[in-house]
Image: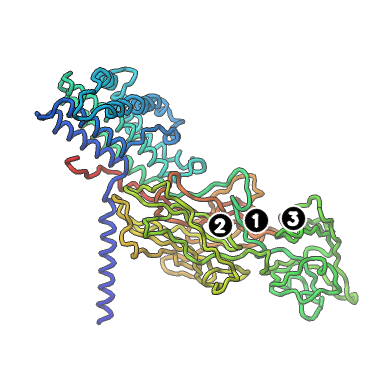
Amino acid sequence: MKTTKCILCALFCTFLMHSNVQSSRHEGSTDPDYARSTYIQLERNLWEKYIDKNTTLTRNERLYKIFNQHFMFIQQHVDQNYNDEDFKILSRYYEWNNLESDVKSIHSLFKDNFVNRLTKDLETNDFRSNGFDERANLDLAETVISDPLWPINATLNKIEINIYQQGLYYKAISEASITLCTAQRSPQQVLYQLYNAITMTELKGYAMMQFSYMLLKTYGRGNYTQESLLMRKNFERRATKAQELMQKVLERADRSLWRCDPNTHKEGSSYLQITRLLQGYIENEVDLNRDGGCWETCSHYQLTESHGCFKDLYCAKQPKCSGKLLFCTFVDSDMWVCPAAPNSDRRYEYIEYENGRTLGEKKYCTRGTTKVDSWWRYLFWHCSYCFCICDEQGKKSDRFFNLRPALSNISDNMIVTGLKFTKQNRIIHLQIQEGQLMERGRVNATSTRWVPVDDYTLLDKGVRDGRDFHTLAWDRREVDLDDLTAPSGHVVTGVKFRIVGRHLNLEMRVSEINFSNGRIIEPEKSFWISNDNTEQSTQNGNRRTEITLKSPDVPVRSKAKSLPISQPNTYIKFTNTDMGKDAAQTTVPYLDAQDVVNSPPVPLEGVGVFLKGLDGYGGFISPRIKTFDYGPYVQAAQTPKDS
């Protein structure tokens, strides 16, 4: 009975925890929505307190209020620069080409005229002086309101027609997926940055219009109260429409981000290798058994080792395989072997058999070929050279994965913003980039850094296989391919690999955040998430399935760029390249060493590893990130009534 009560209590607490997560999911607004709401409240207060209302303030004091509050708002909330990259996704659409020059004119007028006018008058005046340049201010106001060369109000209407009514955001969804390789942003982030840019364009135009109405009324050039109210009403209507549309668009947009292949591969910067895990190796049958006999066939030897070097024949001329010899097969009796360079991870460049078959790419052999012939013993037994797969640990075999966690410094409000595979001291690490979380889902770009991986070696005191690192071998070489997603309102703050059975399995640490103030909530309550399914799982049909490479060649030999070829809840085994294409000399897949980071950096709501490649090639195991979902926060901000 006591146990039952404990279970019910735990379930109730879990329910409350998840209820709290759900209820806080929509608290807060994105930067552009917050800026828009803040400005609407600011200009409303200015009208009500200093412009429409009878006040004892002098005209100069009222002008100072108008100028100073606009200047402070711009400093805190508005990027004055125009960035072509934000709109690049729209470049091939007629609707944008019909609008682009007008959008640029708003940004130009805002930065070159409006902000300069604010700055100049505030530098030379305060509320006690009387030095505001009336003529210059009225010229600016009249330009904003009525100059046909700067059609602000008409541009705001064109934005509504072209962007919202004609569905340009929806058209941009497919375009966002296409630009993944060049933009280095998830499709949702491309669309969110576009929404941010459009919103701030509208806000700049609206702020200049309201400012101009305020100036004209303050200088006694008309009333303009009704014009201001009508414009605010239309602006708020457009804002609501834009928010509703963008919520739907962001919900449909993919948040995954991964790196496409570079134009030119370079080991260490674009890819890493597991070396000499499984590798083609020539051995005579006489050395494959303890008895030194030749009475079996090559295929008999599926798991053995080298037991000697009969009469110092070819075995004495090549580096010995001191580990397991697997999956032996017979190709032909006699051959010419082109050995690889001594410092190479390969054993052979190619092998050419007398029957005409060649294993690997035949080319000029720098070290010269060696003739290798099988022989007969006592006329009855043929001592054949077999082609086997060697699994040998040694100085040339980098086959180790780090099992220690890579964590962001949550005590300093740091979160994970990127991933990449790196190799240190022959050990593969999944390295994280961290950045400081700020208000409304922003990340302080100047704070980002790649957290150094643990600098340990395999031989350090206290370092243990199975705890600190995992060693691959022919019978434990599986890697689980998964995408992990955090609960709503949580972000990634750590990653690590663990061992599940024989599989390397990805885990991620997540922490709850307050979106509005940008703080991690109770960092000590962070927890780990993983996919625990195995190939034996029977519940809900979630059995993990294997991805098999068919006749794989070296990945970097492909002339085309890799594409994702795995689904979550699968796994792949490291294996050797195809015998015919590469003499089984290379371990595949490779590991993608490119950094996976959104530009600009954003919080992550998920991480994963997947296989990308092409048919007939070994492919790459690559990191993948899932950017934070800003969709639920595209909404009007709750701002104080007084500012």
From the image, tell me which residue sits under label 3: 360
Judged by depth in the image, the label closer to the viewer, 2 or 3, is: 2
Q: Secondary structure at mark 2?
A: strand
Q: Give the residue type at disc 2.
A: Thr
Looking at marks 3 and 1 on the same chain, the residue that comes earlier in the sequence is marked by: 3
552 relative position to 227: left or right:
right
Q: Is residue 616 visible?
A: no
Looking at marks 2 and 3 on the same chain, the residue that comes earlier in the sequence is marked by: 3
Looking at marks 1 and 2 on the same chain, the residue that comes earlier in the sequence is marked by: 2
Looking at the image, which residue is at 56% across and 53% down? 593
Q: Secondary structure at mark 1?
A: loop
Residue in the foreground of this view, choosing between 275 and 480: 275
The quarter of the displayed image where residue 39 is located: top left
Q: Is residue 531 above or below residue 152?
A: below
Looking at the image, which residue is at 29% across and 29% down? 123
Q: Is residue 72 visible?
A: yes
Res 552 label: 1
Res 422 label: 2
Q: Is residue 503 above or below residue 487?
A: below
Measure how far apart labels 3 and 1 are at the Cα level. Answer: 12 Å
Q: Give the residue type at disc 3.
A: Gly
